[in-house]
Image (cartoon, helix red, strand yellow):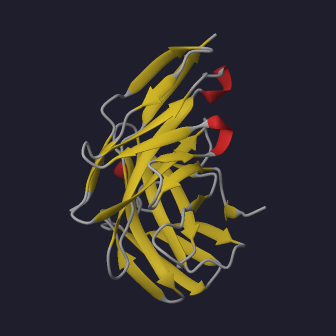
Amino acid sequence: DVKVTQSSRYLVKRTGEKVFLECVQDMDHENMFWYRQDPGLGLRLIYFSYDVKMKEKGDIPEGYSVSREKKERFSLILESASTNQTSMYLCASSARAGWGTEAFFGQGTRLTVV
Amino acid sequence: AQSVAQPEDQVNVAEGNPLTVKCTYSVSGNPYLFWYVQYPNRGLQFLLKYITGDNLVKGSYGFEAEFNKSQTSFHLKKPSALVSDSALYFCAVREGSGGYQKVTFGTGTKLQVIP
């Protein structure tokens, strides 16, 4: 069974902390994504990566960075956490082959910044 | 720029009745369309997709969706709703053209199936 695993289900961090969210996939997918999900706003793309060490900004990259040193792992970094980054964060992966490939999602990390 | 709209925040339907969750899209080229479902405190799960070919697409758990190019719609349907279908449903679109194209998600529709 295909799997995308996020390191934490729930996190509570303090304002100003540097926060790392980790995501690992076991499907040998080229593409990996980080989204945040907020009520009424749906999913918004933060960053995506189409290969190791490659990254592209999504719709809302401000305040975030990413790292992809290995194909299976994609990390989201909140450089200095702020309360407006309290959200559900979803990692996803997809194969590169064809435009019709669906994404597989992790279970999500609910981050609260206090 | 591509976009997708889900005009209903919530849809209520009685168990056993047919259900429809609406989605309209806007792209400049050919669309690739997806439906995902999210159960509480979980990630999204893929339900079905339209790439090309038959306008009626069948997916997981008895769901189907109808692609209508003239109305730019991709409504999700099921002939007989189950209480276990209660969840949050997302429509998504990707425009098919050269280079990487990101997927745009709608804001989601909460489906409530009433026993």
- In the image as oriented, which residue stretches furthest toward the right? A1
- Say left or right for A112 vs B15: left
Q: Is residue A13 visible to us here?
A: no
Q: Is residue A5 above or below residue B110?
A: below
- Say left or right for A38 vs B43: left
- The answer to which image quadrant residue B23 occupies is top left
Residue shown at the point (34%, 66%) measured from the top left: A63
- Which quadrant, please, contains the N terminus of chain A? bottom right
Q: Is residue B24 above or below residue B15?
A: below
Residue shown at the point (55%, 63%) measured from the top left: A92
Image spot of residue A15 (x, y percent) = 42, 55
Q: Is residue A81 visible to us here?
A: yes
- Say left or right for A7 vs B63: right
Residue shown at the point (62%, 44%) measured from the top left: B42
How many numbered circles are shown? 0
Image spot of residue A75 (x, y percent) = 55, 73
Q: Nearer the viewer, residue B101 or A98?
A: A98
Residue shown at the point (57%, 18%) measured from the top left: B113
Image spot of residue A96 (x, y percent) = 52, 78
Q: Nearer the viewer, residue A38 or A50?
A: A50
- Say left or right for A26 vs A84: right
Q: Nearer the viewer, residue B98 or A91?
A: B98
